[in-house]
């Protein structure tokens, strides 16, 4: 097992309902440590750039609109097997398919407004962390 860093976003549906603490508690209970965190209003360009991999998908424009509809909280999470552990505690993309006890099962509103983002690989985690954080903003 290796200590890893992964990237998380608490999405606008969750910040709007004042669930930042509740979501973060789930992450911490799973053994992940928040080593960087900031609340941001994403610009359209930032959201489009972040989700560029999805730009040909039918849901892209709606997803970008949703992601800029209110504040987000971007975080760096650290822990043993952090990438996989975070994906597990997040639950499936569609909350209807998410396991009981996961963040998306408990909090998500829909497949789009699903409360959290989490990196899907160590390689993408490094890219996504660098998109939002300078190295000196991360305190392990
Ligand atoms: N999404 C959506 N409709 C879909 C699939 C995904 O609106 O049919 C949104 C949803 O917010 C999801 C994000 O696009 O979290 C990125 O999709 P991905 O397949 O990468 O899912 P994730 O890795 O977030 O579970």
Image (tube, grey):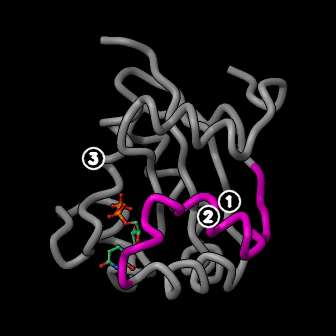
Of circles 2 and 3, the one toward us is 3
Query: What are the residue bounds of the magenta stretch?
Result: 38-58
Residue drawn where x is 15% and y is 71% of the image: 97
Q: Earlier in the sequence, mark 3 or mark 1?
A: 1
Label 2 CA crowd tier, 10 Å (few <14, some 14–19, many 20+): some
Q: Which residue is mark 2?
A: 20
> Are the residues tagged 2 and 3 within 8 Å (C-beta)?
no
Q: Which residue is mark 1?
A: 73
Relative depth, front residue between 136 and 108: 136
Of circles 2 and 1, the one toward us is 1
Between the C-alphas of marks 3 and 1, the distance is: 19 Å
Residue drawn where x is 62% and y is 69% of the image: 48
- Residue 137 shown in magenta: no
Label 3 CA crowd tier, 10 Å (few <14, some 14–19, many 20+): some
Numbered label attached to residue 13: none
Picture quarter with the N terminus: top left
Above or below, comparing residue 107 to residue 1 in the picture? below
Picture quarter with the C terminus: top right
Relative depth, front residue between 129 and 76: 129
Residue 6, image x, y percentages: 50, 35
> Are the residues tagged 2 and 1 within 8 Å (C-beta)?
yes
Residue 112, image x, y percentages: 40, 80
Ligand number 1: quarter of image: bottom left
Q: Is residue 107 left or right of residue 65?
A: left
Q: Earlier in the sequence, mark 2 or mark 3?
A: 2
Q: Is residue 1 left or right of residue 54?
A: left
Residue drawn where x is 55% and y is 80% of the image: 13
Q: Which residue is mark 3?
A: 88
Q: Earlier in the sequence, mark 2 or mark 1?
A: 2
Q: Is residue 31 left or right of residue 25?
A: left
């Amino acid at each position: 097992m290796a200590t890893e860093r992964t990237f998380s976003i608490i999405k606008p549906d969750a910040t709007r309902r004042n669930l930042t603490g509740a979501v973060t508690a789930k992450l911490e209970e799973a053994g992940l440590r928040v080593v960087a965190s900031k609340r941001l209003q994403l610009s359209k360009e930032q959201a489009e750039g972040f989700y560029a991999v999805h730009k040909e998908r039918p849901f892209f424009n709606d997803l970008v609109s949703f992601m800029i509809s209110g504040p987000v909280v971007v975080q760096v999470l650290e822990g043993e097997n952090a990438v996989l552990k975070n994906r597990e505690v997040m639950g499936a993309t569609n909350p209807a398919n998410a396991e009981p006890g996961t963040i998306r099962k408990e909090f998500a509103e829909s497949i789009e407004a699903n409360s959290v983002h989490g990196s899907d690989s160590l390689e993408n985690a490094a890219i996504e962390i660098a998109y939002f954080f300078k190295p000196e903003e991360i305190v392990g």
